[in-house]
Amino acid sequence: MTVTAGNPHAVAVLAVDGVVAFDLGTPSQVFGAAVGPDDELLYHTLTCSAGARPVATSAGFDAAVAHGLDAVGRACTVVVPGPAGGSDAAHGRVDDAVLDALRSAALRGARIVSICTGAFVLAAAGLLDGRPATTHWRYADRFSRLFPSVRLDPDVLFVDDGDILTSAGVAAGIDLCLHIVRRDHGAQVANRAARRCVVAPLRAGGQAQFIEHPLPERDATSLAAVRAWALHRLEAPLGLPDLAAQAGVSVRTLTRRWRAETGQSPLRWLLMQRVQLARELLEGTDLPVEQVARRAGLGSAASMRAHLQAALGQSPTLYRRAFRASVTSS
């Protein structure tokens, strides 16, 4: 789904009563921060509701909405922010006009996205039947009871199933919107958008949701410096002993603290950073695939091919070709 310069990609943010205010603002904030080389906007975001009516938010105020469901009919991407857990929509009870608008958008090929409990709305429209999806972990049991045909994975930040994407709670919506920008325009544009929003540029979808993890003690929260050290040495064959030595702790302590802070094991985190670096090198340089693999710390071209195939469903050559074709057409 290509977004062309001078012709911003139309995004409709479809609000329902009880919408979480943070979720409602996330798409316009992130997509609005995605700009081209001349600072041109790459997305045009409209917030809409059934009948263009004001929408009650979970924060205790009503959101004035300027557009009706016709905005959904024109949009290339439709985002449904999450309604609060106690709302009708988060129990699968959704206005028929909203459900019909979503079904029509999906039928004509629009990309459909949900944030947090917005997955309940998509599922109520029948758009998630037989498909993988996620939602906030707190409501996973309810979701599974209401929509048993959906292949729910409550342990990940977001699920990209091509034309339908779903995210976990609150901040995971930022991760998903940045993922969409990255998918549309590549890592450099997404990273710039993340900097404008002052958020982490990449938390991969397969990363675990932070489910009732107690916060580490104050003196045990300083592994960020070790991660920064590792990011400057991805080409090197780093292992757990190297990271533990840099942190001045045992391997066991390192692994426990690392997982508490990132939701991933140290080696999984390293692999994700190396895959991300490989993507950036494939997008932004003409280095041969073998050199990209070495610089990213992924070993041989064959090893990198396997990792990119697992992460992106494409070989390095096909990924580079597809990215270059997207940039050329824009």
Image (cartoon, grey):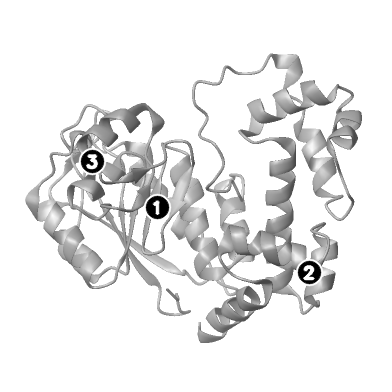
CB contact under 8 Å: marks 1 and 2: no
Nearer-the-camera pick, 145 or 327:
145
> Under tag 1, what secondary structure?
helix
Nearer-the-camera pick, 217 or 267:
267
Mark 1 and mark 3: span between their CA atoms? 26 Å
Q: Which residue corresponds to mark 2?
A: 301
In front: mark 1 or mark 3?
3
> Under tag 2, what secondary structure?
helix
Percent position (x, y) of residue 106?
24, 65
Measuring 32% from the left and 69% from the top, which residue is drawn there? 76
Q: Relative to 241, does residue 24 appear above or below in the rendering? A: below
Dividing the image into 4 quarters, which one contains the N terminus?
A: bottom left
Residue 281 lies left or right of residue 182; in this view the side is: right
Give, as a three-letter code, the residue at label 1. Answer: Pro
> Under tag 3, what secondary structure?
loop
Percent position (x, y) of residue 218?
70, 15
Give, as a three-letter code, the residue at label 2. Answer: Ala
Q: Quadrant of residue 224?
A: top right
Nearer-the-camera pick, 173 or 8:
173
Measuring 37% from the left and 47% from the top, which residue is drawn there? 133
Residue 147: image tag: 3
- Residue 15 in sight from this viewpoint: no
Q: Which residue corresponds to mark 1?
A: 27
In front: mark 1 or mark 2?
2
Q: Residues within 10 Å of mark 2 (few under 14, many from 20)?
A: some
